[in-house]
Image: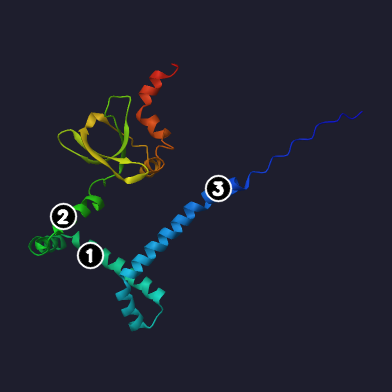
Amino acid sequence: MNENKPLPELEQPKPIRDNIIIGLVALLPITILVFFFRWLYLTTTELISPLTQLVVGWLSVGAWFADIFVLAVLIAFLFCVGLLVRTRLGAFFGELIGRYLLAKLPGYRLVKETIAQFIRTDKASPFSKVAVVKFYGEDVGATAFVTAEHENGYVTVFVPTGPNPTSGLMFHVPAHRVVVLSDIPVDMAMRTVIGCGVGAQPIVNAAFAPIITGQSGKV
């Protein structure tokens, strides 16, 4: 005698809206990257367009080939300049030109020092260290980026405000109030700022591990 077994319930199809949202989430990062590289390419080619026109008229080639040729020449030129400046003779003449000629231009020193702080190769660049600043004791902290460490024991940090990580506040605090999270990548911290705290569990675990461990089992 065969028993009548109930048929398994079929999975209900997801609403059209959910599928559209899932597709948007899947394609949005790629779309943003495409638009970013397109903007970068258009901006770069616009800047080098005078040189590109010279190459087109000189070699009688297409514009795209002229763009690639000019970019390759510029990269090679920058490499050679950097190689020359790192030699003793190049550093001497560079310092001489900068001190007696370029330093007289208004704003030159400010621009040079600002750029040097972000692209310097002898020290860690700013925003390379993720940290949590504990302003109000051990129980409360703010995600921050270490921008400078000083000889008097103080640390300069930048505390961004979500969802725009380029805006925020700068603080000078004692080093013992700053917990450097060496295992947290900068891009992960940036994503938590953009997401207004979403995905910050690794940061919380790393910064407040002693407190979480001590409070485990307490409700």
Looking at the rendered structure, the kind of residue marked 1 is Val
CA gap between label 2 and label 3 equals 47 Å
Mark 3 sits on what residue?
21
Q: Position of residue 30 (x, y in %)?
A: 48, 55
Q: x and y percent of residue 83 in the render?
A: 23, 62
- Contact? badges 2 and 1 (CB < 8 Å): no
Residue visible at 36% across and 27% down? 208
Q: Residue at x 33, y 78 (%)?
A: 53
- Answer with left or right where residue 192 lies relative to residue 136: right
Specify few, some or many for label 2: CA neighbours under 10 Å numbering under 14, 14-19, or 20 or more: few
Give whichever of discs 2 and 1 has the lower sequence position. 1
Q: Quadrant of the N terminus?
A: top right
Q: Whole-Å distance between the Cαs marked 1 and 3?
A: 49 Å
Which mark is on residue 110? 2
Spot occupied by residue 153 in the image (x, y as percentages of width and height): 18, 33
* Point 19% across, 61% down: residue: 85
Label 3 neighbour load within 10 Å: few <14, some 14-19, many 20+: few
Quadrant where the C terminus sits is: top left
Q: Which residue is mark 1?
A: 81
Tell me the SS state at disc 3. helix
The residue drawn where x is 39% and y is 62% is 39
